Image (cartoon, rainbow, N blue to C red):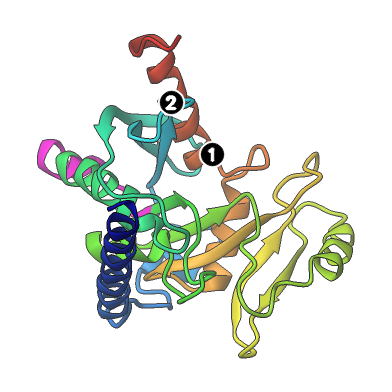
Amino acid sequence: MAAALLEGECKNRELLLREWERQQMELKEQMIDHDTEDWQSNEVFEGLERIGGVDLSYIKGDEVNACASLVVLSYPDLKVIYEECQMVCLTAPYIPGFLAFRETPFLEEALRRLQHKDPSLLPQVIFADGNGILHHREFGVACHLGVLTDLPCVGVAKNLLHVSGLEEKDSLKEKAKDLQKEGNAFSLIGSSGKVLGMALKSCEKSTKPIYVSVGHRISLDTALRLTHSCCKYRVPEPIRQADIRSREYIRKNVNVS
């Protein structure tokens, strides 16, 4: 009986992964990896006024309940002008490479609610805590969210995802040591020869790079420049504020033993 149940679970998981991969490939066909907005074409991003940041914070020891956070910051002064935190119940399992199916529905819903409540506050670009095309199938959470909302989206990860061509940790560590000054960066090139993202020293005090990649409707060069311009600390301010506020929401509203 136990063996039959285990076999059934394995088959169900395999079917789920096939379906998710099919959906990823369909959505990937809609992804745009170049600049589409006027504000993206100038050095100081003239015309850019609102930047969004999204994040999910988990309760320690709880893989089901989490806090989904959306913040909107003014640009260029990076002040929070809108925030929403909401507890959500995650129904999809965590499977590496398919994080978007677990988290994106709640982030998309938050953006839809804002669009309904006050369209004037809708962000012109979103920062997602995760990867864009720096992904095993070149379609990470930033791509997924960007395509579903049709908003420009940038993926920023704190840890490097070792996709094909980026497995040599020692060589990448050596390159990271060469990032001496704020704004220094180097390309992350996959085994196909394609540049999947950039490692960036985001601020002077940071000792570790962050990893920037295209999500949707933005070029890598623009994504890199915009990310750097939003960094008071290591992590760009939209993501940092979304993370701070979601954790604070959990602390105040959830009884954690």
| Residue 113 in the image, given as x and y percentages of width and height | 15, 40
Question: Is 124 part of what is drawn in magenta?
Answer: yes
Q: Quadrant of residue 234?
A: top right
Q: Nearer the viewer, residue 1 or 115?
A: 1
Q: Left or right of 154: which side holds 227? A: right
Q: Residue at x 53, y 67 (%)?
A: 222
- Placement of 155 over or under 208, stated as above or below: below
Could you say which disc has been placed on residue 237 in the image?
1
Q: Is residue 126 visible?
A: yes
Residue at the outermost bottom position: 192
Q: Left or right of 46: which side holds 207? A: right
| Residue 35 in the image, given as x and y percentages of width and height | 42, 74
Q: Quadrant of residue 72?
A: top left
Label 2 element class: loop
Label 1 element class: helix
Total numbered badges shown on the rendered structure: 2
Question: Is 215 part of what is drawn in magenta?
Answer: no
Q: Left or right of 85: which side holds 210? A: right
Q: CA distance from mark 2 to mark 1?
A: 22 Å
Q: Quadrant of the C terminus?
A: top left
Q: Which residues are magenta?
A: 114-125
Q: Are marks 2 and 1 in contact (CB under 8 Å)?
A: no
Could you say which disc has been placed on residue 59 in the image?
2
Q: Residue at x 44, y 51 (%)?
A: 128
- Placement of 106 over or under 67, stated as above or below: below
